[in-house]
Amino acid sequence: EKGGWDSFMDKEIHEDPAAVQRTLLGRLDKNGDLNLDEVRIEEHELKAIDKIIVVACGTAAYAGQVAKYAIEHWVRIPVEIELAHEFRYRDPILTPRTLVVAISQSGETMDTLMALRHAREQGSKVLAICNTQGASIPRESDAVLYTHAGPEVAVASTKAFVAQITAAYVLGLYLAQVKGAMFRDEIQATLDALKAMPRKIQWILDTQAATVRKAAEQLTDAKSFLFLGRHVGYPVAMEGALKLKEIAYTFTEGFAAGELKHGPIALVDEGEPVVFIVPPARGRNVLHAKVISGIEEVKARGAAIIAVAEEGDPDVERYADIVFWRPKCPTLMSPLVDVVPLQLFAMDMAKLKGYDVDKPRNLAKSVTVE
Ligand code: F6R
């Protein structure tokens, strides 16, 4: 069942490239137009959508947070992301022009299901991004976009995360098409960039796994980790932190790198491991410079710097103690590669500590209670 891997998590991380690829498969019809799986929303209603609210929990919520950056950029409508269990109890503003997007691997998460029911009662349309055919969440939604990651068995979500980002990007491009927010060739070029990602993820798996393993060996006994990123690197940092706490039972905190000076830097002490998601270095990327200055700040306080960065980034080479390299790709695509070494790192740490990586304590694969 594990296909030669010694854990499902191992197998599923190695299926990251296929999860992205399969989720993109068959999305274009013969006219070159994008298609979703099931859309029971009228075209004029879709055109009128003026706000998106993503509801999800845990890893799925981080995928939604990544998608916010892309969809706002492409479609030019506001995208809010909210934890499903918070959404329902705060009297959210929902209209028939709000599209609620429920992201769920299992399709059975009770918090997310209750949030979507609430949204529909208020007259909003709900689109599900789900990995499980016919589950409750897609069944109760107005439209469905399936992630084709294949069954995910390990409790910690890995391949589903990259598939969720991919599906949410397809949704963004679909809305851009319907609303005429992007030119056809821009949509095509973005899809081409997405299609190039499975190969880049594979490159990480092939070339960075040994470095990741060595880092885990060096850091097995670390008591805590900080994970920092900006822009799309922010939710990736949160996800990296979640993976490590979830299966290696290590205290982690993920936050926006810009917040460092507003409090968290007080935690940084000699030897504290700090993981930075560094944005692409090309051009005069202002985000890159900001993240590098964050690295300088914590380095000056003696932290151990672990960076996820673009191949050959000279600033990172100068400051980081350990680097997980990513191949060049556009900023909006970078989460699909950047999360991969963090998934591997969490798994290696958990294995080195002797834990069952597929079945972490206290957790269930699908959370069917509110
Ligand atoms: C983390 C993890 C959880 C789930 C969350 C939502 O590794 O697996 O945080 O992402 O419980 O589950 P789904 O996507 O099934 O709704």
Image (cartoon, grey):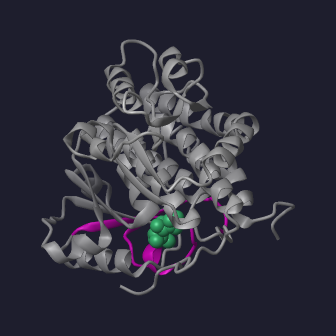
Q: Where residue 156 appears, x then y in whole percent? A: 57, 66
Say whether residue 308 is magenta: no
Q: Is residue 204 left or right of residue 190?
A: right
Visible residue check, residue 39 = no
Q: Nearer the viewer, residue 139 or 284?
A: 284
Q: Nearer the viewer, residue 323 or 264?
A: 264
Q: Where residue 38 appears, x then y in whole percent? A: 47, 64
User: What span is in magenta?
Assistant: 124-151
Residue in the picture at 19% in, 58% down: 97
The quadrant in which the C terminus is found is: bottom left
Outermost residue toward the right in this view? 4
The quadrant in which the N terminus is found is: bottom right
Q: Is residue 197 left or right of residue 271?
A: right
Residue in the picture at 56% in, 44% down: 28
Determine which quarter of the picture holds residue 96.
bottom left
Q: Nearer the viewer, residue 148 or 124?
A: 148
Say whether residue 150 is magenta: yes
Q: Is residue 291 left or right of residue 338?
A: left
